[in-house]
Image (cartoon, grey):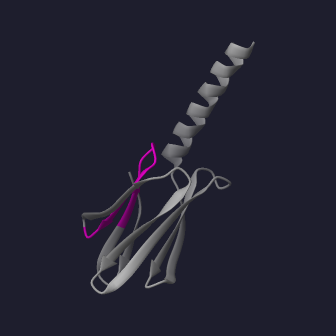
Amino acid sequence: MKYTDFEINGNSIEFHNSIVGKETVFVNGKVTSEKFSIFGTKHKFDIERNQYELKSRLQPYTGIGVKLELMENGELIETRVVNNAKQSIIWFAAGLSLGMVLFRIWS
């Protein structure tokens, strides 16, 4: 599911994240990086002669949010915190269900 996109020098950089932790970065519609992550990771890719790094980090204190830092040639150029309400609800429901199961087992 698409979380956010960045427009840099006429190029589109999209960050996608699935409920199971698969992160994908697209540049101009093409996959440039795919990784699995629970707490965050770094995606490195090149556009023309510039090196980019998109860091993702889970922000558990802001709901189920993800902090994204986009760097160009080692310099931070943009930071975003993206909250996805749909995933927050799914994680809440999963946690509640697990809690109820464990309660029944231990009772």
Image position of 57 (left or right of 35): right
- What percent of the width, then of the height, locates residue 23? 41, 55
Residue 105 x/y as whole percent: 68, 14
The quarter of the rendered structure image containing the C terminus is top right
The front one of 72 and 63 is 72
How many marks overall?
0
Residue 17 colored magenta?
A: yes
Residue that appears at 31% across and 72% down: 12
| 86 in magenta | no
Tell me where residue 47 sits by quadrant: bottom left
Q: Residue at x 42, y 47 (%)?
A: 18
Query: Compared to 49, does 63 lie above or below?
Result: above
Q: Residue at x 61, y 26 (%)?
A: 98
- Which SS type dominates the magenta stretch? strand
Seen from the viewer's position, the closer of residues 75 and 82 is 75
Point 45% across, 70% down: residue: 54
The stretch of residues the image draws in magenta is 14-28
